[in-house]
Each structure stands twice: as C-alpha cells, then as structure tokens.
Image (cartoon, rainbow, N blue to C red):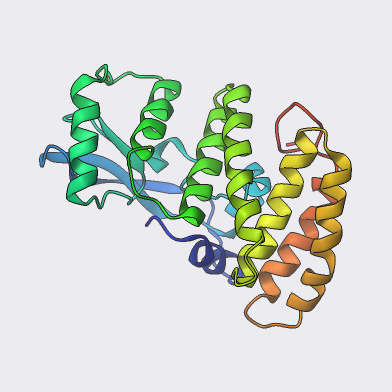
Amino acid sequence: MFMNARSMVLSGLLTFSAVVSATTWLPTRITDPISGKQCVVQTPGSSGSYIYQWPEKYDQVFWPLTDRYGIWVCRSSGFAAFIGDIELDDEEKTAIRRFLKNAVPLPKEAGMGAVLARVESIYALRKVEPDAKSRILRALAYQYESNGLQAKANELRSQAAAIMETRLADEKLEPMLRLQYLFVTANYARELGQVESSDQKLKQLSPLLADASTDEKLKGYAEYVQELIVSARKIAPGGRLAPGE
C-alpha cells in the first residue's frame, strides 16, 4: 500500500482508463506492530485517475497518503504511520516503544494536528531511505497545510527540498524521479518567493520532458508534468502551494 515514488506514479499516471465516481474506504483489521493487538484502520476500496488532479499534485504526493484515513493510528499503543507502512525492525520497535511510553496518549477524538505530530515523531525514529523520506515529508506537509498549519507545512517542505536537491546531484537518479524532483523543488522555490530559482529549475526540466515524451515508460508522466507547469507558475509566495485550488 505504501508504494515507492516510482510505482505510485506509474500505477496512476500511465494508466488513465480506471475512473470511478469517488474514493471509498473499507475498515480493515491489522496487527499493531508495537502492542501486538488488533487495530481497525481504513484501506482504499476504490478510486480513479482524477486523484492526480487534486491540489496535492504540486507536492507530487497523492491519495491515499493525503487523506486523513491515509494515516493509520493504533490506539492501543499510540503508534501511527502512513497507510501500509507498519513493518518495523527490532531496533525501530525498541525506540518507538520508548518514545510512546513517555508520550502523551492520543485520545480517540484527537485532532489532526496532534495525529500529524505523532506521525512525524515516530518517523524520526525510523530507518527511511532518502526518496521515501522526501515523500513522507511532502505528504505530511500537505496534510499540515490542509489543516491550517501553513508554517509547519513550509518547514517540512524545506526539509524535503533539501533531500531532493541532494538526490538531483546524483547522476544515477532515476529519470522519473529527476522529473518529479525538479518540478516539486521549482514549486517550493516559487512558494518561498524565489522566482528566479524556480524558473531556472523549470528551464532545466523543459528539455528533460521533451526527451521523456519519446520514451514509452516516461511519456505519460512527462505529459502530465508538462500540463501542470502553466498553473505551477501561478504559485504565490507564502500561501497554499496549490494556486487557485
């Protein structure tokens, strides 16, 4: 469920045939990785390609990660993580148990701000490779922004941008991730008022999109990003990342 960046993009953006009327959720029982008890969470029942046109497209993180049900919370222990991302090694379990033992319990009616803070704290104790870390930070940023916590969203976007910039310096970076990271960091720079830097990134992106449009594996994604650039140029400093949404 917690797809890597490449498979998530490919699964939706290269296949536009599946369209349904709405996203749906189904209650599912999982085992809390910390307490070992049963935990009821929500899993996707259906969705369509329209999810790639929702406001989170400027962060390039998508449903279900951007939905409130896209965060699994197990009340028995207080553990929280993005949907499906519950595999922990022994070292992670020990660190998280220690943290949760001293943490303020999450009440059943806890607001999303408290839930997001819990997710952020737990991921800080987990072993996460850079591309997944960038995606987690961007998903958290979008969720914080959606809940009116703009300053926190901007803070996490800055952290994600630093990771993406490091990855962009790697000549072996996967082509699709290079397209994605140039697009997202251009958006983040624009929101910070760094218009010249944003334009420079989009300038770097342009020939890469042209090349990708001739590659069957990248063509769908390249066309998708190209269509977003016009609206991305309208991102205003300081406000929500999604212009006019």
Image point (68%, 72%), residue name? 220
In-front residue for pair 105/20: 105
Give how far across and how far down residue 242 sits, in percent.
72, 38
Q: Quadrant of the C terminus?
A: top right
Query: Which quarter of the figure has residue 177?
Result: bottom right
> Is 28 above or below relative to 6?
above
> Is 202 above or below relative to 232?
below
Query: Which quarter of the figure has residue 149?
Result: top right
Give how far across and how far down residue 232 sits, in percent.
79, 46
Query: Which quarter of the figure has residue 160?
Result: top right
Image point (47%, 46%), residue name? 65
In the image: residue 63, left or right of residue 158:
left
Q: Quadrant of the N terminus?
A: bottom left
- Asked if one can make out residue 169 in the rendered structure from this viewpoint, the answer is yes
In the image: residue 162, left or right of residue 192:
left
In the image: residue 28, left or right of residue 84:
left
Image point (74%, 45%), residue name? 187
- Asked if one can make out residue 244 in the rendered structure from this viewpoint, the answer is no
> Is 139 above or below relative to 238?
below
Q: How many marks?
A: 0
Give how far across and how far down residue 243 sits, in percent.
77, 37
Image point (75%, 68%), residue name? 223
Give how far across and how far down residue 184 sits, in percent.
69, 50
